[in-house]
C-alpha cells in the first residue's frame, strides 16, 4: 500500500506557461486502522510513513488522547514537542547536506548526515527513558543535563557544517546584502548553494504572493479549518494557502527582509529554520516555549494539528466502543500541491522561463523536497 501519495505535474506544450498539478492521494489510512485499539495506532502510523514518522505519531497520540479525554502534563507536552522539532531539524539538515550539493555538482556530506541521524533516538532516551514518547498517557522523565547536551550538539553541527557562523549571527543578517555577504564569506556547502542561485539569477524566480496557513489557536478555528480540509473545499475559487517551512518562517526578519520571495527565499527559510530550532528546543526544555501543537475533542472527534517538517499535519480520530471507527489525516501535501496551491502558482510563475525545467524541479524541492512527484511536458522551441 502507498501511504505517501504522488504528485503529477504537467506543463502544456507551447509557451503559455500553463501547468496542471494533480495530487494522487494515498490509500485511506482508516483501511488499516479501523477496529484497532487506540494504543496500537501511533506506532503503526510511525512505521508506515517513511517521512516525518515522529510527527505522525505525535499528531496521532494527541488526537487519540483528545478522543479519550486524556490530557498530558506540561512537561510531557513540551518534551514531545522537542522531539518533533528535532525531527524537523534533522530532516532540514539532511536535505541541505545531501541534496543541495547534488544541485551544485558537489559531493554530499554523508558524515554530517550520519551525525545528525543519531540525535533523535538519543533525545527520546533523555526525555522518556525506555518509554514510548507517543504512547497514550505517556509521561516524560527528562534528564535535563543529557537533553541540553544534545541541543548543544545540534547547534554545533548547525554552526560548523551549515552556517559557518553562530546561529544568532546568521539570524541577525538582513536583506539581500546580508545574504550575499554570508554566502560570499562562508565555505560551507549551503553557502555554495546560495551563491549558485545568486549567480544563475534564480533567487527571485517563482515569486508569488504568500498566503500562509496558520496553526489554529482554539477549538472553533480548528473545527472550521478541518471542515474545509476534509470536505475537499480548499480552493473555493481562490488561492489555497500554503503550509511549508517558508510560510512558517515568513515573518522572521532574515526572510521577510529579502527583496523577492521567490525560490531563493524558500531555501533561505530552511536555513533560518535550521538556525532557529536549537534555541526553540532549548526554550521548550526550560519550560519557556509553547509547543507548536493543538488538540481538542470536536463533535466527538479527537483532533490534533502539529507543526511537522513539511508543514501543518492534522489527525482526526473517531472511536466507538474503545476501537477506531474512523480516522483521517490532512497532510501538508493536501494544501501545497492542490491544483490551486502554492506549487501550482510557483510553477506557473516559471513556466515561461528559458530554464523552466531546472527551475520547476527547484520549485518542488523548495516547497517539499520529500514529496514523490513526476513531471511531464518537455520544453519545446517556439
Image (cartoon, rainbow, N blue to C red):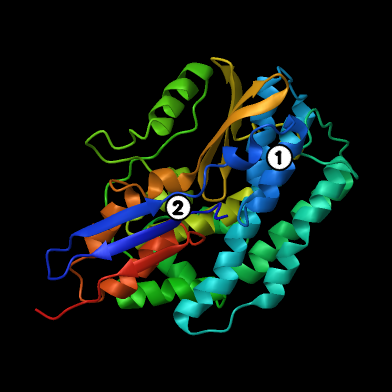
- Left or right: where does residue 89 sit relative to residue 19? right
Residue at 34% of width from left, 47% of height from top? 338
Q: Residue furthest top?
A: 299
Of 378 and 358, nearer the camera is 378
Query: Residue 59: image x %, image y %?
Result: 63, 36
- Give the side of residue 122 with respect to residue 239, left or right: right
> Is residue 148 in view from this perspective?
yes
Q: Is residue 221 above or below residue 55?
A: above
Residue 339 place in picture, x, y as percent: 29, 48
> Closest to the observer: 270 or 4?
4
Pointer 1 local density, CA inside 10 Å: few below 14, some 14–19, many at least 20: many
Q: Give left or right: position of 316 versus 154.
A: left
Can residue 163 be seen at all in this image of the molecule? no
Residue beneath disc 2:
254
| Residue 360: quarter of image | bottom left
Q: Quadrant of the N terminus?
A: bottom right
Question: Looking at this view, is 317 or 273 the one in front?
Answer: 317
Pointer 1: what residue? 42
Amino acid at each position: 500500500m502507498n501511504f505517501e501519495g504522488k504528485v503529477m505535474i504537467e506543463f502544456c506544450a507551447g509557451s503559455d506557461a500553463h501547468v496542471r498539478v494533480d495530487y494522487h492521494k494515498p490509500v485511506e489510512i482508516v483501511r488499516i486502522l479501523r477496529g484497532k485499539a487506540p494504543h496500537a495506532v501511533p506506532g503503526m502510523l510511525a512505521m508506515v510513513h517513511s517521512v516525518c514518522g515522529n510527527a505522525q505519531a505525535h499528531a496521532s497520540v494527541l488526537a487519540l488522547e483528545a478522543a479519550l479525554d486524556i490530557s498530558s502534563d506540561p512537561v510531557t507536552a513540551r518534551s514531545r514537542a522537542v522531539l518533533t522539532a528535532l525531527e524537523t531539524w534533522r530532516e532540514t539538515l539532511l536535505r541541505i547536506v545531501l541534496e543541495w550539493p547534488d544541485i551544485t555538482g558537489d559531493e554530499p556530506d554523508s558524515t554530517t548526515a550520519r551525525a545528525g541521524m543519531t540525535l533523535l533516538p538519543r533525545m527520546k532516551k533523555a526525555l522518556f527513558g525506555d518509554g514510548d514518547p507517543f504512547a497514550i498517557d505517556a509521561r516524560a522523565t527528562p534528564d535535563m543535563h543529557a537533553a541540553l547536551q544534545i541541543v548543544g550538539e545540534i547547534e554545533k553541527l548547525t554552526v560548523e557544517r551549515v552556517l559557518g557562523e553562530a546561529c544568532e549571527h546568521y539570524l541577525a543578517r538582513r536583506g539581500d546584502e546580508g545574504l550575499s555577504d554570508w554566502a560570499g564569506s562562508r565555505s560551507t556547502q549551503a553557502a555554495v548553494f546560495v551563491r549558485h542561485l545568486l549567480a544563475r539569477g534564480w533567487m527571485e524566480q517563482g515569486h508569488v504572493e504568500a498566503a500562509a496557513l496558520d496553526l489554529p489557536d482554539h477549538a472553533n478555528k480548528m473545527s472550521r479549518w478541518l471542515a474545509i480540509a476534509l470536505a475537499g473545499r480548499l480552493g473555493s475559487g481562490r488561492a489555497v494557502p500554503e503550509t511549508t517551512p517558508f510560510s512558517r518562517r515568513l515573518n522572521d526578519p532574515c526572510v521577510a527582509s529579502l527583496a523577492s520571495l521567490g525560490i531563493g527565499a524558500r531555501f533561505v527559510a530552511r536555513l533560518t529554520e535550521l538556525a532557529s530550532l536549537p534555541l526553540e528546543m532549548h526554550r521548550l526544555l526550560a519550560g519557556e516555549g509553547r509547543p507548536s501543537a493543538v488538540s481538542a475533542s470536536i463533535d466527538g472527534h479527537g483532533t490534533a494539528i502539529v507543526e511537522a517538517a513539511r508543514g501543518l499535519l492534522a489527525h482526526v480520530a473517531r472511536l466507538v466502543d474503545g476501537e477506531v471507527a474512523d480516522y483521517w489525516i490532512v497532510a501538508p501535501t493536501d494544501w501545497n500541491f492542490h491544483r490551486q496551491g502554492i506549487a501550482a502558482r510557483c510553477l506557473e510563475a516559471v513556466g515561461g522561463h528559458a530554464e523552466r525545467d531546472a527551475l520547476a524541479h527547484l520549485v518542488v524541492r523548495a516547497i517539499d523536497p520529500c514529496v514523490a512527484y513526476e513531471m511531464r511536458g518537455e520544453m519545446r522551441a517556439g
